[in-house]
Image (cartoon, rainbow, N blue to C red):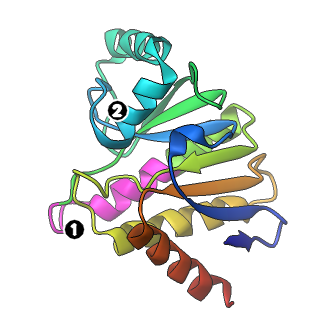
Amino acid sequence: MEYASGTGKKIVLMQGDITKIPVDAMANAANSALAGGGGVDGAIHRAGGPAIMRELDAIRAKSGGCPTGSAVATGAGNLPARYVFHAVGPVWHGGKRGEPELLAACYRKCLELAREHGVRTISFPAISTGVYGYPQKEAAEIAIREAKKHLDDPSTPVEQVVFVLFDRAADEIYRSLLQSTSGQ
């Protein structure tokens, strides 16, 4: 499924393994220590190889990590991309601790990094919806809103945002929201 913005740029939904989708940059659902982990983070590190962790080690040595709601860029190692944007989404605590704004900031920071690095295609997992417990529908609404806002800006170099969803349930949520927000 695709959504085309008024600028001709698009959002694409795919179900599968984010580490296998060729893009200029892929977002990683990272932790604030940038220390690797399970889920998408573990898959990206396994597929990308040790070069990614070496770059993260240097970032940690300099800044100590990455705050929630932000992201840092590294090379992509063996992945079919040029960059990985390690985004730190919020842990869900019922939505009363600024989680929606932190998650939106996470997507915005990745899209800012895309602009800074001249990225034309970027993929995202469903950030914070795994072990961090963010409800799928609420997270998808934020992700789609931020992607659309960015793509509607004619000055952005990003031409395509790909949401790579792990399972059918997530895919159906994104499809439903994308259809309802694009008037299809």
Identify the amino acid type marked 2: Gly
The structure residue drawn at horizontal position 84% and vertical position 66%, both measured from the top left corner, is 8
Residue 111's tag is: none
The structure residue drawn at horizontal position 27% and vertical position 32%, both measured from the top left corner, is 37
Magenta-tinted stretch: 93-107
- Judging by the rendered image, the residue that carries numbered circle 1 is 95
Closer to the camera: disc 1 or disc 2? 2
Q: Quadrant of the C terminus?
A: bottom right
Dividing the picture into quarters, in which one does residue 68 lie? top left
Identify the amino acid type marked 1: Gly
Q: Where does the image place residue 120, in percent across and percent down from the top left?
A: 76, 43
The structure residue drawn at horizontal position 65% and vertical position 31%, both measured from the top left corner, is 81
Helix, strand, or loop for circle 1?
Answer: loop
Residue 45 magenta-highlighted? no
The structure residue drawn at horizontal position 58% and vertical position 21%, both measured from the top left corner, is 78
Q: Does any portion of residue 149 appear in the rendered image?
A: no
- Judging by the rendered image, the residue that carries numbered circle 2 is 42
* Secondary structure that dominates the magenta span: helix
Query: In the rendered view, would you say 178 is above or below 15?
Result: below
**Left or right relative to 79: residue 102:** left
